[in-house]
Image (cartoon, rainbow, N blue to C red):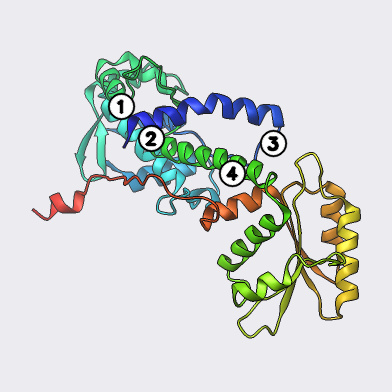
Amino acid sequence: MNIRYLLEVIKTYSWWRKWKKMKGNKGEGWMSEINLPKFDEFLAPILKYANDGKEHTLSETIEAMSNQFNLSEEDRNLLMPNGKRTYIYDRIAWAITYLVQAGLLVRTGRSKYKISDRGKAEVKIIPEKISYRYLEKFESFRKFKESQHPKKDLTGHEILYNGELTPDEEIEEIFNKRQDILAHDLLNYLTTIKPSDFERVVIDTLLLLGYGRNFKELAKKLGQPNDQGIDGEIPLDKLGLEKIYIQAKRYSTEHPVTSSDIRDFIGALTTRSPNARKGVFITTSKFTREAKEIAKKDTNHSIILIDGLELAKLMIEYNVGVREIKEYTLKELDKDYFESL
């Protein structure tokens, strides 16, 4: 990885956290709160679990810890954003790794471990719950930590680290916070462009989402004068047998879409055609609570509301108005290779 680039991203987080606190929009970003024990909450329980002196596997430990913490089936199967590992797998695997680095556990084989002599002595005095920093009392762990997280970079700036996260979760958090920053930058830019350009952005995004037969058709149907509450009708299939109706509003963030706007849109759908039952209202702003309720309660139409932040996320996902600048490849130990020797 380009360490200097990551450091710049991490230093941006101070601004990001202040912005989130000021806006009070917790939970609107790419990251949502995961209601599972942090990886360091498994440290003491795993060490005590291993105190029987037997050899244990990772899968056995996951099952034992899941039962001990009364995790639901949904919690046990909750996947990380990469879609390859569950959170519980990742957190317990890293907890075992850290206990090994502290010398409290020893590896005995592939995904296997048992308690060490140091661990047997420590388990007698270890508190019920310990933090990541508890392990810093062991020299081997301090060296391990310093190899992962030097105190300062080459320019003298301190490197921020959240000890509650596993390394994999750190990477996910860095990536998702970076996406959050990009989404808000994109949203701010959308509010400055011309209405006709915004309609073009909507067209490009809807095309990549699979709506519409071709660009020319969409361009004709969006942004016409006297639209009477509808900016366009777009086919849901290639034959145009079913359509959705679009309203796109480039509002400032201080100008939310109100219930009156939604009523006007529903009225326009009703006037348009008896078959006009599906509508999408897109804005660079937000929707008031009343506006959301009106759209939800309308039983004659299916109304989808896409606010500015959601639009920005779709644009990022489908590469509309953004471009790739870097790509990172994460690697892990290939135990199958070594077992095949």
Looking at the image, residue 107 lies above or below residue 297: above
Q: CA distance from mark 1 to mark 2?
A: 9 Å
Above or below, comparing residue 268 to residue 4 in the picture: below
Does dot 3 land on a helix, a strand or a loop?
loop
Q: Give the residue number, with chain letter if any, for mark 4.
A: 183
Q: Earlier in the sequence, mark 1 or mark 4?
A: 1
Q: Position of residue 2 (x, y in %)?
A: 32, 35
Of 315 and 66, the residue lying toward us: 315
**Mark pair 3, 1: CA separation:** 32 Å
- Give the residue type at disc 4: Ala
Q: Amino acid at mark 2?
A: Pro
Pointer 4: residues within 10 angstroms few (<14), some, or many (20+)?
many
Secondary element type, mark 1: helix
* Residue wearing tag 2: 167
Q: Is residue 54 visible?
A: no
Q: Position of residue 54 (x, y in %)?
A: 26, 37
Residue at left offset 57%, top offset 25%: 15
- Label 1 belongs to which residue? 148
Residue at x-position 79% and y-position 39%: 254
Across and down, in percent, residue 335 comes to 20, 49
